[in-house]
Image: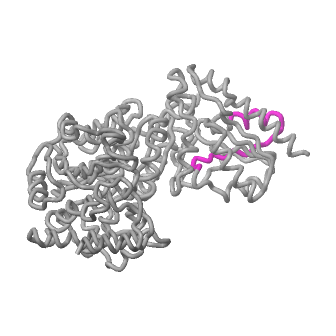
Amino acid sequence: MGNLQNLDIKSLEDRSKVIRRHVIRMLVKAGSGHPGSSLSTVDLLVALFYSKLRHNPRQPAWPDRDRFIMSKGHACPALYAALAETGYFGIDKLDTLRQFGSMLQGHPCMKTTPGIEISGGSLGQGLSVGLGISLAAKLDNKDYRTYVMLGDGEIEEGQVWEAAMAASHYNADNLCAIIDQNGLQIDGFIHEVMSSHPIPDKWRGFGWHVIETNGHDFPAILAAYNEAEAVKGRPTVIVAKTVKGKGVSFMENQVDWHGKAPTKEEAERALAELK
Amino acid sequence: MTEMIATRQAYGDALVELGEKNKDIVVLDADLSKSTTTAKFGKKFPDRFFNMGVAEANMMNTAAGLATCGKIAFVSSFSIFATGRAWEQIRNTVCYSGLNVKIVATHSGVSVGPDGASHQCIEDISLMKTIPTMTVIEPCDAVETRKVIFAVAAYKGPVYVRLGRAAVPVITKKEEPYTIGKASILRTGKDLAIVACGALVANSLTAAGILAKDGIEATVVNTHTIKPIDRETLVNVARQVNAVVTAEQHVLDGGLGSAVASVLAQAHPVPIEMIGIDNRFGQSGEPDILFKEYHLLAEDIVLAARRVLERKKK
């Protein structure tokens, strides 16, 4: 067990296109969901699942696996696609997203989906769960790491900062937060609805090691993950600048694409761009 | 003289015993570890004790994370903060995920006393039992509390245990068995049943004693598990006596009384009178004065018994 594959940058970029195509197909089939928020996370997820996580999709409960928590749970279509593509379950299951009886619920459910570490989707809760996992790893003298992805709208939740304070207090250097900073939330631009800026300074103030990066540049993302792993004595946050709706021109930076599924015609246009 | 011990005292001692036997036990508290008595565990097992500061929402989900890694996480604070502040964390992360988290909260009810209404949680049974899959327990004394803590540690899944600040009489015995979900009948009588939980069980026994002097024979049921409620025992008892009084230190909306009424209305309707707090907040004062003010005393249970017997006659 260990890193799944050691893909070159071109291969990672190809994987991202595959995942993004899945997201579009899943959402048009489901008729609802969150395309913008899913697409912004894809490159960060691909780098993690193909080049960083020590995991074994054939054995999702392997006790020594690295953990990944999608705290911004509405982006789960991208996560489901990454799980399916890396072998946690059949790719055919992606067609069932959000349907009655599906293993792929509208927000993550650990009881139905292999590879999901915690159920939820209510914003602001994932980092605390990640902290609990990191404390358990330390108690058990295990070296697995925990990654938690949050949105830049999500960090408006007060609980995130409770978790940030506690993770720093407990020197949780096996915990890595990834902020998908796409600049938008449901009601509009972050800076107009409720500014969470300056994001890096806030985390530094809470005692975290901060890495700022471009969330769509694979060499930069991989360098950030490696730097985070090397930091000892405190947790690390990767503040990744991303584009909401990344990869589909008419969805990029458009708040309307936060939580609406494309029509068949729109999906065809999107898929054509993702070839 | 009956021994008086607060249920929270028994909690801290039981945790230390459990911690010695089981290395997977971890305990989290939110800066109230002296009051909840989890500090006893923290002193003995500092590596497995996490003081999370005054931040209950984060504490609840940190416990959830620990539970996903095989730990049995006990989480403590005052009832109002554990169940109120962190309700959605309990609902969406702990229970929806089916995690092995034990929320053991102290300072429930008006018996908190001088701290007043803000700290007297009288809604927690309702808040917790409405969540799918949650188990809700309120032991009646310190002896039962020890058994409850061992039982919930052995049980797999989320549990809420409701404890109190004030000393209460020890009315159960060490050697009596304890099973989650199985109500215990402390006294039997043919005229009515008093169904109670927590501190009100002792008052119900006192009330039964007073009634006996007038030739009224009451069954007293200790319904320590409020969810899942022991339907079988409740229906059997109701069939025998055909009149029920419920008694709890909680608002009447959504507490033990409504749970009992729900069972009996569907299975064997009988007249029911309810002792509990009727749509009011608590206030400062010593517990005995507050019990009088909120009609939670043995005398109040006696009056309710007389009312229900009148209704039974009709």
Residue span colored magenta: B206-226
Residue A97: within the magenta? no
The answer to whether any part of residue A185 appears in the image is yes
Q: How many marks?
A: 0
- Residue drawn at point x = 45 percent, y = 55 percent: B95
Is B204 or A101 nearer to us in this picture? A101
Which quadrant of the figure contains the C terminus of chain B? top right
Q: Position of residue B116 (x, y in %)?
A: 53, 23
Q: Position of residue A54 (x, y in %)?
A: 17, 65
Which quadrant holds residue B12?
top left
Is B311 or B239 nearer to us in this picture? B311
Q: Position of residue B92 (x, y in %)?
A: 44, 53
Is A221 or A137 nearer to us in this picture? A221
Q: Is residue B130 left or right of residue B96?
A: right
Q: Is residue A26 left or right of residue A172?
A: right
- Residue drawn at point x = 40 percent, y = 51 percent: A122
- Above or below for B196 versus A59: above
Q: Position of residue A267 (x, y in %)?
A: 35, 71
Which quadrant holds residue B32?
top left
Residue B214: within the magenta? yes
Which quadrant holds residue B233?
bottom right
- Residue drawn at point x = 83 percent, y = 38 percent: B215
